[in-house]
Image (tube, coloured by chain):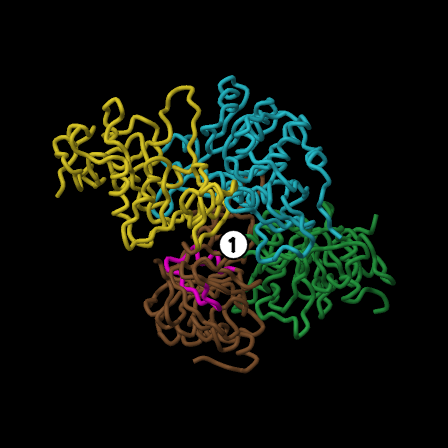
Chain colours: A cyan, B brown, C yellow, D green
Amino acid sequence: MIDKTYSSVAEAVADIPDGATVMVGGFGASGSPIELIHALIDQGTSDLTVINNNTGNGEVGLAALIGTGQVSKMICSFPRSSQSRVFPKMYEAGKVELELVPQGTLAERIRSGGAGIPAFYTPSTVGTILAEGKESREFEGRSFVMERWLKADFALIKAETADPLGNLTYNKTARNFSPLMCMAATTTIVQTKRLMARGEINPELVVTPGIFVDRVVEVADPVHEDTLIADERSYP
Amino acid sequence: MIDKTYSSVAEAVADIPDGATVMVGGFGASGSPIELIHALIDQGTSDLTVINNNTGNGEVGLAALIGTGQVSKMICSFPRSSQSRVFPKMYEAGKVELELVPQGTLAERIRSGGAGIPAFYTPSTVGTILAEGKESREFEGRSFVMERWLKADFALIKAETADPLGNLTYNKTARNFSPLMCMAATTTIVQTKRLMARGEINPELVVTPGIFVDRVVEVADPVHEDTLIADERSYP
Amino acid sequence: MSGGWNREQMAARAAQDIPDGSYVNLGIGIPELVAKFVPEGREFIYHTENGMLGMGPPPTDEERDLDLMNAGKKYVTELPGASYFHHADSFSMIRGGHIDVCVLGTMQVAANGDLANWSTGAPGAIPAVGGAMDLVQGVDRIYVITQHTTKKGEPKLVEQCSYPLTGVGVVSRIYTDLAVVDVTPDGFRVFELAPGVTFEEVEEKTGAPILPAE
Amino acid sequence: MSGGWNREQMAARAAQDIPDGSYVNLGIGIPELVAKFVPEGREFIYHTENGMLGMGPPPTDEERDLDLMNAGKKYVTELPGASYFHHADSFSMIRGGHIDVCVLGTMQVAANGDLANWSTGAPGAIPAVGGAMDLVQGVDRIYVITQHTTKKGEPKLVEQCSYPLTGVGVVSRIYTDLAVVDVTPDGFRVFELAPGVTFEEVEEKTGAPILPAE
């Protein structure tokens, strides 16, 4: 019987090597896999390229991972949030590189990586400095920019429910980029609030089919970034 | 209060004009909106371009629409099913044109139409006669073919449940192309087995958000193509 | 200043122009206030980029779900008939032309509809674009709500944007504290003046030629 | 003919080469039989192009749901842990390289792995391609199950396909009634002979040079 469960977050992230590209689910605090990120901090791998819409908040989760110096490059759409203090410091010190991608293009590039589509055309950024150096082309009298797929070695994902086959559901807007990142990573690692038995998740309700998931670890009572920040916590 | 419900299938398809491009949901018999198709036969519009994976079966539904001569062009991946007799006859008589598109490319072209992506690259058809006349291009040392988006004036869709906002769920593999066609048509017309009150469909279970749907008509006890064929029925 | 609209009045005025049944995306800041002023007898459905249709007002403490946020990372609620979806579907709604109206704030708007609302272009500043470039290209009706001038009194409606562009020729209509201004093939044209505001005052505070209401 | 495998034995032999835990897509015809011969201790999860993972065997009359079909339009069942999705997601699984093994029937296979299984190219015939061209490009391991020759005795393993191609250089391994044949950089090579079959017999019935097992 196929069983993708792992017994701990530490075990689930143990083989992420230096220099890996890692997609991290979540939009701001919602859907951020804090326990997996903290396990990656403990594990200590370095020179990571991280793909996330933002750059973390406070001094926990993704912000903490950037703060330890483990991240050499961020690919994101909005690195400047009100509670984002770590990334600006590291960026200004020249310790982390930034690739800025409009949010819709970021989502579509990730989906394309998962869907085997090496490039597509989008109207976003046409006529702006973010289109500089990119191929553009007219279709039906309108200009579009060509964008390339985006893939990763690993994805760190937070789910609401999961089963041993890796079928996933999410909670509300915690879904965001996660289903796309599951598709685009070679190895997708999921922390789930509830581990269900095989067959317990309604097949019509599955958002991410298990084919896109490699490892599942139950984190029954996950911390939430906003709560940690309100408590002025930092990691490690 | 927004209310997209219509009282009859006849009313729902009344304004489809001659020469329209119409996407029809379903894969073979599963998910085929038979009542909407029959309403289109009654309505009598002609010179239609129809997009569906197949070309219908027996002498009901899509096959019947082709049989009346209302369809001048089919865009599909598999026009030759064991019970498809009408299309071959009309095709051999030169009464209907065929654009053959591989199934995955057909799905992705329709999604692209709905997602505002005018073109994308796919490895499918590379080196085959179906790639002839198409632009090809290398990415990372591999060849890909450029494919264009596909849109329609109308989509005819069968849902399991719908609410007055047009939120939809489907039953099992009756889902197939329907969510994509809802996105890609200017006017999406849905027949639903059950019309639910607003708020009755679990927001996590919605497969097609109402933004992609324009008209909803309840057909509580829909006929099924396979049953009609077993009964040797024809339409009209 | 004697006449003019305050922030809430600007938002209320913009809400007047949104048709019943519209799917609406509201930017952060004054645009968010539009949701407070839905005209009697109309219903708008709010889209948030991070994957939801049918977004409701901020929650009470009891209602709050830490996973339920809007694109501005503020807690929101779920209205009956809501739906959730992932980011690629969310931006398919935007890029594919399914959102009817988007209301945005801005730094500058040019007479040809160019919008600059994402970066001052200051050297060393950390750029952040979010979904703005997707929204302006994908949504047909881009409405902008903004003060007519900066705090320093510099015009925000200009002949050509000096800040980096968000999109070229994308703005339809502008709601300022002084007037409703259309972007037309002939450049800016006043559609309506705020109470107590004269065309001359608007003209003086606009950094490009502007035509009076027809 | 004294030796060789029948249809079921060919399918069973192919099943032996599919690793535990694989996501598998089975074509129509003999490939469908593979599901009957899953080796002890292994589990395969079946994908059907029309939007399902976790497809089970044909239903009883009571179990039958008219909406639940496979890509061959036959009624199937749902196993615990199944999931449903639309066609774009289904072909993302295929095109994106997520399906581990695909087993297909064929009309011809060439020594370089070219596959021809969708059209005879006969003038006037109605072409029908389905998902075959997506599968052969998207799935790494394309296994083919086929009789070694046509009913007329013509070789199906050939130097160059005479029928229109489904894909170029896509086939990994071929299971015929006579042998398991690999497509290698040196062309066809027997991996294993069916019981009672000699290499000479295989060589004679193959329309291209073929190497003996190593």
Chain for mark 1? B
Residue A138 visible in the shown view: yes
**Residue type of the residue flagged with mark 1:** Thr
Residue B190 picture quarter? bottom left
User: Magenta span covers which residues?
Assistant: B177-196
Along the horizontal axis of the image, is A2 left or right of A220?
right
Residue D154 picture quarter? bottom right
Image x and y of residue B151, in percent: 41, 56
Q: Is residue B188 magenta?
A: yes
Q: Residue at x 42, y 72 (%)?
A: B95
Quadrant holding the C terminus of chain C: top left
Front residue of B77/D88: it is D88
Front residue of C208/A66: it is A66
Q: Which residue is mark 1?
A: B105
Along the horizontal axis of the image, is D107 left or right of A86?
right
- Furthest residue toward front: C62
Q: Residue at x 52, y 31 (%)?
A: A75
Q: Residue at x 60, y 70 (%)?
A: D65
Image x and y of residue B159, in percent: 48, 64
Residue D127 visible in the shown view: no
Q: Is residue D192 magenta?
A: no
